[in-house]
Amino acid sequence: MSPTLTTSNGTTHIVNGTKASTSNDTKPKPAELDASKLIITECKTLKPIPPPEGLVYGKVKTDYMLVTEYEPKTGWSAPEIKPYGPLSLDPASSCLQYCPNVFEGMKAYLGPDGKPRLFRPQMNMERLARSIHRAALPSFNTDALLTLIKRLITLESRWIPNLPGYSLYIRPTVIGTRTGLGVAASDSALLYIILSPTGPYFRNEAGGSETISLLAVSEHVRAWPGGTGGHKLGLNYASSFLPQSLATERGYDQILWLLPEPNGGRKITEVGAMNFFVAVKREDGDVDIITPSLDGTILPGVTRESCLHLVEAHSSTSNSFLIPGFPATLRLHAIERTVTVSDLEIWAVEGNLVEIFCTGTAAIVASIGRIGLNGLSETAAVKNRELVLPESEKMGPIAKGLFEALGAIQTGRLQYDSWSVVCS
Ligand SMILES: *Cc1c(COP(=O)(O)O)cnc(C)c1O
């Protein structure tokens, strides 16, 4: 065979099988994630859809999953939608050893028109890109990923339960697949998306979600300055299981995560895997809706940002949006600041503590009825070291109003900006 001479952009010459290149030569670029290359392998038989009432969060998986792999030389492989099933991994894969694993949590909701919808999916894509960067995993085009998610949801839309409070949970996941035990960034990765039909997150015996209880802990810390708490990295969650089981043993639903401050104070960061909010009455009769500022120890929740936004909109002069159940005359103020355990105690003692709630995609909004202070109480006025909210058994009106507003926007029953995105 005669030697080939190819000229691509006038820079690469292959002569006698050896590659001679000029200084501005570029290697073939690894392929970008490309939604137009999607391959669909159909299931031979589809699974029966289980009755929605018995669904447990994350347990049932749908028929399909989406998979694409990154290799440094070739880039992202043609994405494939194929039957849900096990992955095959080398036991020395980086994800199994050093945990460069990141994920997202989003939902598809069924609109009144029967079309599946996503809620502010661009925010999840941006957060996923930040998590990928923090875990030093290969990056990808998030617009392409969003196109693929919409395609997968459209294919799987029969799995979205047509019942209020139900949706299809979406779990995009990226894991490092570099093989070898050297402690180094993973230059190869596997990106996959799995789906799970879900109902109300917190279910009490009456079948509805009312309030949950928290145990404040200081011996275990979820996130710290300069750490990874502000990103959705799998490793942030493994260390929460022991404290969570201790809280469950003591009769509490979730952990209230704290961060000790140099002055001895205890900063509130999050609730389990949800963002923390407290509503406080002001001297002028308005109500402050306060959440900890994004200082790197707080996961920037899409629900958190949406609640802050709706609170502001409710009190804007145009009154173009009102939180259900709240008169336009009640002014609410969205505030991001540090909140400590002693702030909570002071507000409670003064009678200004209106409500505490937490937010996240899974539960949307959950009201908090009581907080065990585990010996943390700094004021004797908090009885039995437990802070009990007024009407602690009932979902508070602010939490309920935000829960209803978000539910209406997510399912497309209420138009708000372009927050609800139809999959097509
Ligand atoms: C995912 C998550 C949240 C909530 O984020 P949303 O985008 O509202 O679902 C809050 N805290 C932690 C630690 C989380 O992992």
Image (spheres, rainbow, N blue to C red):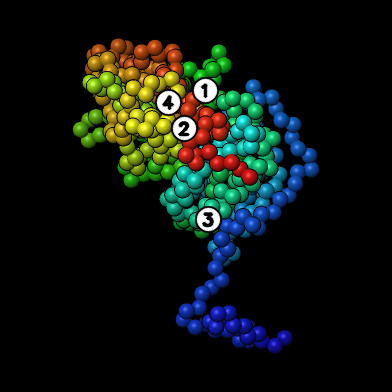
Looking at the rendered structure, the secondary structure element under dot 4 is: loop
Residue 141, disc: 3
Secondary structure category for the residue under label 3: loop
Q: Is residue 374 visible?
A: no
Amino acid at pointer 2: Gly
The amino acid type found where label 4 is placed reads Ile
Q: Is mark 2 within 8 Å of ligand 1?
A: yes
Q: Position of residue 414 (x, y in %)?
A: 52, 31
> Mark 2 — residue?
360
* Amino acid type assigned to the residue bearing label 1 in the image: Phe
Say which residue appears at 47% left-offset and 50% top-offset.
Answer: 129
Instruction: Give the position of the C terminus as an image quadrant.
Output: top right
Residue ID at (55%, 80%)? 9
The residue carrying pointer 1 sits among few (fewer than 14), some (14 to 19) or many (20 or more) residues within 10 Å by Cα, namely: some
Q: Which mark is residue 323?
A: 4
Picture quarter containing residue 297?
top left
Label whose residue precedes the other's in the sequence (4 or 2): 4
Disc 1: which residue: 202
Q: Quadrant of residue 74?
A: bottom right
Inter-mark Cα distance, 4 to 3? 36 Å
In 3D space, how far apart are the residues under numbered discs 2 and 3 (Cα atoms)? 25 Å
Q: Position of residue 209 (x, y in %)?
A: 51, 19
Task: Inspect the image, locate mark 3, and give the three-letter code of the amino acid beneath it.
Answer: Asn
The span from disc 2 to disc 1 (Cα, nearest Å) is: 12 Å
